Image (cartoon, rainbow, N blue to C red):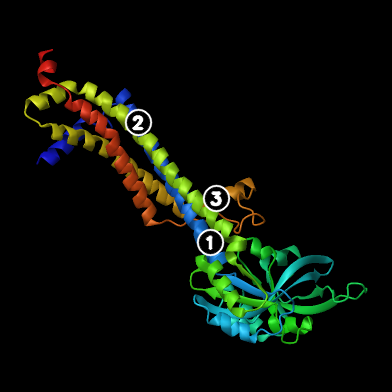
Amino acid sequence: MMLFFSLFTAIRFSNIFRKINILSFMSIIAIFGIILGITVIIIGLSAINGFEQELNNRIISVIPHGQIYSIKQPYKNWYLAKNKIKKTPGVLGVSEYINFIGIIENGIKLKTTQIMCISPEKQNQITNLHHFVLNDGWKHFMQNNQSIILGEGLAKLLNIKLNDWITIIIPNIKKITNIQQNNRIRVHVIGFLRLNGFLDQQFALITIKNAQEFLNYNNAITGFIIKVEDPFKASKIVFNAGLRTMQNVVVKSWIDDYGYMYNDIQTIRGILYLSMFLIIGVACFNIVSILMITVKNKIIDIAILRSLGIKNNHIYKIFLWYGLIYGLISSFIGIILGILISLNITKIIKKIEFLTKYNFLSSDVYFINFLPSKLKIINIIYVLVTTIILSLLASLYPAYRANKIKPTHILKK
């Protein structure tokens, strides 16, 4: 009963729903500050979660977790090394590959590109690259000879259409002192890769059999691409696999090229959590001034309650409830707004970009060209718990001051 009495008294003391005065105005400002802080934090955390999800989907799942390639190219005696790599703890899959620099030519347009050459049948065991190839291109890639898959951005740059025949110019560098004609290979464009990021601008894929024929490699390769159990331990696992080959090889993991993205995301997430504490803390501690004014305005009411036998702990509960009411109302409204905006932030930014004709995220700089968002319940719980705790902390001092009131002294006046 006393718990409900404390809550009822706290609601009666509250000025939120009464006529407009300085205290009710301050109450509205305090609530608005908490709502704004909670909304911004939820949107920011959702955006960071979205970036992390896209990093996992578009980078970690598409590129090999690791590469091992021979210092001396081409890599000829590789069969025994492949078996040793397969048996390395933590390795889930391994496939041979060839990598070379070529010039993509379409009419008068040229683009120097790093061309990746893989085995389509084994690639599915290493990456999810095939999920991002449009128009059944991967199926045709596995069946057709002299075919190529291009990044959608690269194709647009060179004005290449599906089913076009284009030329790959392979520089002849075997005899540097002699002037030689470059190798020119005609290939059929059977698909495009769409990742909505910078990989689209520099991606070209042909089969390893075609590459061995074009480069006169016979059965030689460049090296191996590897998939591991835990991508974030890729560096250690790939290093151990390289040691097992007992050959002069270079080892490399995805972290070497793209790990900075994940580190940046974790750093920004940490900054957002700190900002959450500070923003909501500043907003919540506006409650202190409101409660202190309330203590002063309600000093006679508090004295009467004390004279009727209300104990100190019940006075504490009244003002703790008072602060908690502000925190709960603000949290509820802020969380609802944050959820609604977070679920639609990608569309909202797209609309703004369309109206302003300005891209906030350029695929030339970032690995995606849109603002992603992923709402997590755990983030909402963190925000709610933080707001409630800070609201209660902000109520402690006013509650302490209210308990210091001496009813006999006040009522005599």
**Closer to the camera: disc 3 or disc 2?**
2
Q: Amino acid at mark 3?
A: Ile
Residue 54 — which label?
Answer: 1
Cα distance between the residues tagged 1 and 3:
17 Å
**Mark 2 sits on what residue?**
286
**Snapshot quadrant of residue 5:** top left
Quadrant for the C terminus in the image: top left
Q: Residue at x 76, y 85 (%)?
A: 213
**Mark 3 sits on what residue?**
349
Q: Earlier in the sequence, mark 1 or mark 3?
A: 1
Residue 390 is left or right of residue 90, and the answer is: left
**Snapshot quadrant of residue 98:** bottom right
**Snapshot quadrant of residue 108:** bottom right
* Percent of width and height locating residue 14: 24, 31
Mark 3 element type: helix
| Label pair 1/2, CB-CB below 8 angstroms | no
Mark 2 element type: helix
Q: Earlier in the sequence, mark 3 or mark 2?
A: 2
Q: Nearer the viewer, residue 373 or 80?
A: 80
Q: How many marks?
A: 3
365, above or below 12, in the image: below
Q: Residue at x 54, y 68 (%)?
A: 236
Cα distance between the residues tagged 3 and 2:
32 Å
Count residues near mark 2 (Cα–Cα under 10 Å), then give few for <14, some for 14-19, many for 20+: some
Say whether residue 329 is visible.
no
Quadrant for the N terminus in the image: top left
Count residues near mark 3 (Cα–Cα under 10 Å), then give few for <14, some for 14-19, many for 20+: some
Q: Earlier in the sequence, mark 1 or mark 2?
A: 1
| Label pair 3/2, CB-CB below 8 angstroms | no
Count residues near mark 1 (Cα–Cα under 10 Å), then give few for <14, some for 14-19, many for 20+: some
Q: Amino acid at mark 1?
A: Glu
48, above or below 288, in the image: below
